[in-house]
DNA sequence: CCGGATCCGTAACGATACTG
DNA sequence: CAGTATCGTTACGGATCCGG
C-alpha cells in the first residue's frame, strides 16, 4: 500500500511526504545524539506504539535518512544511525527548533520528560566550526536532572548522552534557562553573571567554548555562503 | 477534546505540536503569497477535506499563526493571513525546503499541480535585504505554465500570485530549473548563459535582482548575527 | 531482555453532500 | 462563498505475544 503523499510539485511538500508524519522528526532528533537501539528509541518516544516505531524506522531507512548497523559480538545488537542525508535534515530543523523556543515555550507542562541531549543536539549546531581549529575538548552539560556530553574538535562536533568518564569541563544550568538562551531572550554572558549558568573545569576549555558559541542567539537565520 | 500532543520538554516537540499535523505547513506556505480566501485555500490544497481545512484554520488562528480579516464592501469577504509569528515560522521553513530540493526531487510525478508562488515565496527569502536600499522593483516570474510576482523594496519583499498590471521585468524558466538552482546544483549565472533562465525588461531592475540574489545557493544554512 | 509482529479499539483524515 | 454534517477509510495507541 502506497504511503499517503501530497502529490504537488513543491519541495516543501516533498520534504513533508517523508518527514511529515507523526513521530518521524522526533525520531531524527533522537538519532542526533548518536546511534540508538530499538528499545532506546521506544523508551525516549513515550506513547509511540511498537508497531508504529518499527514502521517509521523502515520508512526512514527506505528514504535513506537512517541506516541500520549490526554491532559485532559481544555487543551483538543492531543500532540505527543517521545517514549523511539524515544529518543534513537534522541541521535543517534548527530554525524550526529556535522558532519553537521563541514562540511555543508556554506548551511546557510540569512532569514532561526531558533529556539533556534533546537540547544539546541542536545547541551543538550553533558552534562556529571555523573557530575550532586545533582544539579537541569534551564538555559535560548538566541540564536539570539529566546530562549529555558535547565533544568539539576541529574535525567534528558530536553529542552523546553519556555517561562518559573523561571530560574537560562541566556546564550546569536548568532546562528553562536553555530555552531562554535559545529564544534569544537571554545572553549567555548574562546567564553566567547572574548564576543561572555555572561552569567548572579546565579554564582553557571553557574559554574556548565561549569563543565558539554565540553570546546571544539571533532572531533570524540567514543563508550565508560557505 | 484536547489535541494530540507529544508532551515533551523539547522545543522541536512544541513546534510539531502546532505544525506537525497533515496540511498545516502547506497552509502556511499558501499564505506566504498574501492573504487568501477559504475557497482559494481549498483549491490550492487538492485533496484536503473541507471540514479538515476549517479545523486547521481554527487551530492556526488559536495558535496565533494566522489571523482572519474581514474585507469591507464591496469585496465583503473574509481572508486569512499570516501573523508576525506565522511569518517567522514561514522563514524557519526555508532550510527544510532547500533540503527537499536537494534530496527529494525524485518525488515529482508528471501531472502534479504546480504554482509559481510556491517556489517564489521561499526564493524571496534568499534576497539580501541589506542590499535593497532605495530600490523598489516588481518582477514577474513565469515558471512553466504559471506566474507570480515579486516586489522587492527597501522596506519589504512580498510575493503575490498576480496577475499584476505593472511590473519592471520578467524572469522566465521552468520548475525543474528552479529546483536545480535551489538545490545548489546550478548557478543562476550559468542558468542564464545556457538559456535555461531568460530575462526581459528594465535593465536596471534586472541588474539589481542579480545583485541581491545569491548566484549559487550554499549547501548549508548557518546562524549569523544580525 | 531485545527486536520486533499481531490484533483491536479509537482518533484522524478524505470525500461528498448540504446550508445560511 | 464560507463553511458544517455525515460517513467510510486510514493512521495511530496500547497491549499482548513470540522467536532469538
Image (tube, coloured by chain):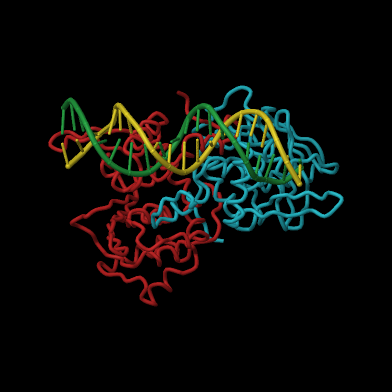
Chain colours: A red, B cyan, C yellow, D green
Q: In this view, does A70 lie to the left or right of B34?
A: left
- Whether residue A25 is situated above or below residue B175 in the rendered picture: below
Q: For residue C5, which quarter of the picture?
A: top left
Percent across and percent down for residue A205 are 30, 63
Residue name at image x 69 percent, y 35 percent? B43
Total numbered labels placed on residues in the image: 0
Residue A5 seen in the current view: yes
Assign the N terminus of chain A to one quadrant of the image: top left
Q: In this view, does A104 lie to the left or right of B123?
A: left
Percent across and percent down for residue B218 are 53, 43
Residue name at image x 17 percent, y 34 percent? A76
Which residue is most to the left? A74
Residue name at image x 75 percent, y 50 percent? B78
Percent across and percent down for residue B130 are 66, 57
| Along the viewing direction, whichever of B79 and A156 lies nearer the viewer | B79
| Along the viewing direction, whichever of A72 and B58 lies nearer the viewer | B58
Residue B106 seen in the current view: no
Q: For residue C17, which quarter of the picture?
A: top right
| Along the viewing direction, whichever of A113 and B184 lies nearer the viewer | A113
- Whether residue B13 is situated above or below residue A72 in the rendered picture: below
Percent across and percent down for residue B32 are 66, 47
Amino acid at each position: 500500500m502506497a504511503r499517503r503523499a501530497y502529490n504537488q510539485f513543491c519541495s516543501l511538500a516533498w520534504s513533508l511526504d517523508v518527514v511529515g508524519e507523526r513521530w518521524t522528526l522526533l525520531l531524527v532528533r533522537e538519532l542526533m545524539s548518536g546511534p540508538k537501539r530499538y528499545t532506546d528509541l521506544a523508551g525516549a518516544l513515550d506513547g509511540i506504539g511498537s508497531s508504529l516505531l518499527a514502521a517509521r524506522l523502515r520508512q526512514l531507512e527506505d528514504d535513506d535518512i537512517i541506516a541500520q548497523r549490526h554491532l559485532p559480538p559481544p555487543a551483538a545488537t543492531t543500532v540505527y544511525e543517521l545517514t549523511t542525508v539524515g544529518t543534513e535534515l537534522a541541521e535543517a530543523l534548527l530554525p524550526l527548533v529556535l522558532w519553537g523556543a521563541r514562540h511555543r515555550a508556554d506548551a511546557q507542562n510540569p512532569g514532561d520528560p526531558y533529556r539533556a541531549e534533546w537540547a544539546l543536539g541542536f545547541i551543538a549546531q550553533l558552534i562556529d566550526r571555523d573557530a575550532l581549529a586545533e582544539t579537541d575538548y569534551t564538555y559535560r552539560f548538566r541540564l536539570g536532572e539529566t546530562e549529555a556530553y558535547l565533544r568539539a574538535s576541529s574535525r567534528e562536533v558530536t553529542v552523546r548522552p553519556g555517561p562518559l568518564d573523561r571530560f574537560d569541563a562541566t556546564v550546569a544550568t536548568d532546562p528553562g534557562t536553555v530555552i531562554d538562551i535559545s529564544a534569544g531572550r537571554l545572553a549567555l554572558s548574562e546567564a553566567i553573571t547572574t548564576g543561572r549558568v555555572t561552569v567548572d573545569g579546565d579554564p582553557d576549555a571553557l574559554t574556548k567554548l565561549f569563543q565558539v558559541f554565540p553570546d546571544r542567539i539571533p532572531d533570524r537565520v540567514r543563508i550565508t555562503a560557505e
